[in-house]
Amino acid sequence: MRPGFADPVLDTQASFRAILEAMSRPGRIQRLEAAPTPPAPLAPATAAALLTLVDAETPLFTDVGGEAADWLRFHCGCPIVPQPGQAAFALIVGAPPSLSALPAGSDEDPQAGATLIWQVAALRGEAGWRLSGPGIEREHRLEVRDAPASFIGEWAEMGRAFPRGVDAILCAGRDLAALPRTLRIREG
Amino acid sequence: MGILARSSAAAMTEHLEAVPPLPSHTRLRGPETGLVMLRGRAGGDGAAFNLSEAVVTRCSITLSDGRMGHAYILGRDDRKAELAAVLDAALQDPERRPALLSGVIAPLAAAQAAGAEATARKAAATRVQFFTMASMR
């Protein structure tokens, strides 16, 4: 078993600040320096986001197993649920499930929508998708390597149900970017 | 673990000097201090109620061979929690277990038993016999 954050209090605060910054500036890549060294297949940024956001009150759906799942259970203390529909957070390192499979909240309680923590191969600004929406003056670019082609269509489909929807946090290595549900994505 | 939880860090360190040194370890979590709610039941079978909160320190460590040790102790003694967690992990090792059991755990258990007996003796000396209907008959 590997340890979590070296300094649980300050590192969690720094990660929370980075996630907040990422959510307020959708598509801008944040670099997490104070990330732990988690067991494979988790990346440092993924682990930092999980340690910061997930706890005993947030059921997690995940496609990782073995040592990584044990590590999450120990350090986050979160219940791991078998169906994405029961989750508050979904940790995905492989192909993401259909966005409609995750809870989207209701019109009265849109905050009950799940957050997708999606680990991708690499993130790069200045290329790829064209992002617009609240928090972006004109346009941000974000390239998500190996993102499935159907993702943009599903995202647009989800946007029609606003304020219901799913927020996404994309992690790769020590980099992290967020896609809040208000974001509009166009192919670059 | 109960014996370790009831003894002090100083007593543990003292007995550890006599046995082979403990293996090196990595901290997984803590030592960190928090509160736990103690719950009680009136008469042992009544409805549960919150009795009070207690200060508890916990620590989890791992040894280089992958064995994990955990400790939850009453109070705020970080060093005691860490020592107890390391001992918990080391005691799982069949090679270290006999030396640790005889060198550390047994003397601590004996000291605690002696302390408990001394308290019981003191209490017994001041015991008052009430003459009830049952004993007078």
Image (cartoon, coloured by chain):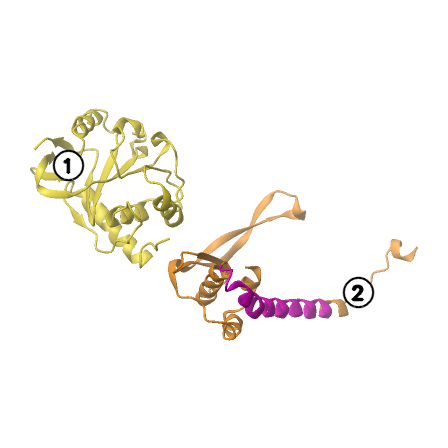
* Chain letter, colour yellow: A
Tell which subunit mark 2 falls on.
B
Which residue in the protein does label 2 denote? B128
In this rendering, the answer to whether B121 lies above or below A91 is below
Residue A46, position as x, y percentages in the image = 26, 46
Secondary structure of the residue carrying tag 2 is loop
* Magenta span contains residue A124: no
Which residue in the protein does label 1 denote? A134
Tell if the residue under mark 2 belongs to the same chain as the one under mark 1.
no
Q: Which residue lies furthest to the front in this view?
A: B95
- The magenta region covers B93-122
Residue at left 45%, top 71%? Answer: B21
Residue at left 11%, top 30%? Answer: A186
Give the colour of chain B.
orange
Q: In screen coordinates, is A124 left or right of B134?
A: left
Q: Tell me the amino acid under the disc marked 1.
A: Pro
